[in-house]
Image (cartoon, grey):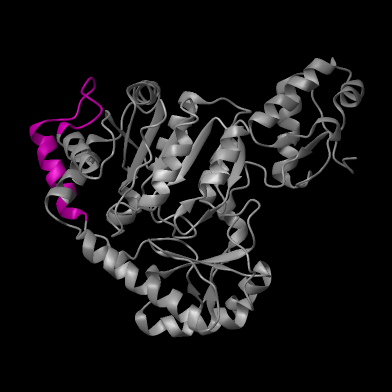
Amino acid sequence: MLGDYRIVGRRASEIAASVERGVGAGDLEPGQLLPPMRELATELGVNPNTVASAYRTLRERGVIETAGRKGSRVRPRPAGTARGTIGVEAPPGVRDLGEGNPDPALLPPLHEALAAAARRNAQEPGLYGQAPVDAEFGRLARAGMDADGVPDGPVAVTSGSLDAIERVLAAHVKPGDAVAVEDPGWGSLLDLVSALGLKPVPVALDDDGPLPGEVRKALAGGARALIVTDRAQNPTGAAVSKARARELRAVLAQFPHILLIEDDHGHAIVDLPLHPLAGPTDSWALVRSTAKAYGPDLRVAVLTGDAVTVDRVMGRQGLGPGWVSRLLQRAVVQLWTSGAVDPREVARSYGLRRDALVQALAERGIEAHGRSGMNVWVPVPDETGAVTRLLRAGWAVAPGARFRMSSPPGVRLTVSGLSTDEIGQVADAVAAAAGPAPARSYG
């Protein structure tokens, strides 16, 4: 069953570690069927409950999955294998449109903001026992969310959006719980859900966000949480419209006890208004990152939500890292108050390139999606073939496998690195590489 690989160990932790080593080394391949628990227990000379405990640990870590009488198998993509590794290395002479980074030319210089934060720290040193959220940072962050209609709630600061989402999930759900996620969706989030031992439930979407019927189906099927990207959805560029938000809030009102998490990472780079979904559920959180507009290396995100959720997040954070550097928080305050970034100009720049590429592809008979943000999603019949042909033509793009669960194949292009002169060249290459797009929606 396992070829030459032998699972070893006498204790549950040892057996689990043996399987995990095999997966990490490639000796146990994705989809590999593991021995039945009683059979492995007999072989190792241990109690079947010991093997059951080991398999349970492996499920919670996202290494294996169990399908009843069909047995336990190595996950098709074990949690230790990040979707980000599914990519295309751009050799010399090839333009990389697959990384998803913001345009460095649109990011502000940080030296003045960091210097201002250092000067303030000289006057008011950051010490143990101080509030984890800088008062001015919290005030400005809350004022921005108030302006966008986000329900009132306390403010926390985390090390990026993914850190916030992980902490909120940990505050409410447990390994084995189902979580509804967009499909296609953010690869890092899909990795995180699996790594936490949660079961991702795919929810199809269109340019206006998750489809209400799909959300209702997922929640009625037992999903304990729903994660939605409000704007600049990765990889499709979808943005929740006003009408769609109304429909989704009506669905959420039927499931008031589920956890709602909204990711508004597109804040300050998207010119479409925010239509928050929060309100119908008892537990909710909305997170905004500074990464796309001010720099990925700042690692600062704002979190708000209901009082219980934010209190749990801050309490657990206090037992680990304690807080996000107040020096960084104060640097962000300086960036906000000095007008270091013009959100309208940033949104206009990304919008011009994105819309031009979508239009150029349409003129060549290629379906493409990119309503907001810096990404364009192109459905293709042959994902691997399209990626390979584009690479030969001098363009590296992100394979859809990085983002998909059950949705049709596709590729993602990030427009942040494109000049207007290159739009037509990319469109020609995609048209030649992609072929006729499948006549299907994302899901």
**209 left or right, relative to 175:** left
Task: Indicate whether 165 appears above or below 98.
Answer: above
Give the image location of residue 381, x and y in percent.
67, 70
**429 left or right, relative to 383:** left
Q: Can residue 67 be seen in the rendering of this structure?
A: yes
| Nearer to the camera, 438 or 269 | 438
Give the image location of residue 41, x and y in percent.
87, 21
Instruction: Tell me which residue sits at (12%, 46%) in the image.
Output: 116
Quarter residue 84 falls in: bottom right
Quarter residue 438 falls in: bottom right
**1 left or right, relative to 271:** right
Locate the C terminus by quadrant: bottom right
| Nearer to the camera, 302 or 1 | 302
Residue 244 located within the stretch drawn in magenta = no
Residue 120 located within the stretch drawn in magenta = yes
Label total for image: 0
Task: Indicate whether 293 appears above or below 95.
Answer: above
Instruction: Tell me which residue sits at (24%, 22%) in the image.
Output: 128
**264 left or right, relative to 115:** right
In magenta, the rendered stretch is 110-135
Q: Give the farthest residue toward the left.
A: 123
Quarter residue 269 falls in: bottom left
Give the image location of residue 333, x and y in percent.
17, 44
Q: Can residue 10 be seen in the rendering of this structure?
A: no
Give the image location of residue 356, x and y in percent.
39, 77
| Nearer to the camera, 436 or 337 | 436
Locate the N terminus by quadrant: top right
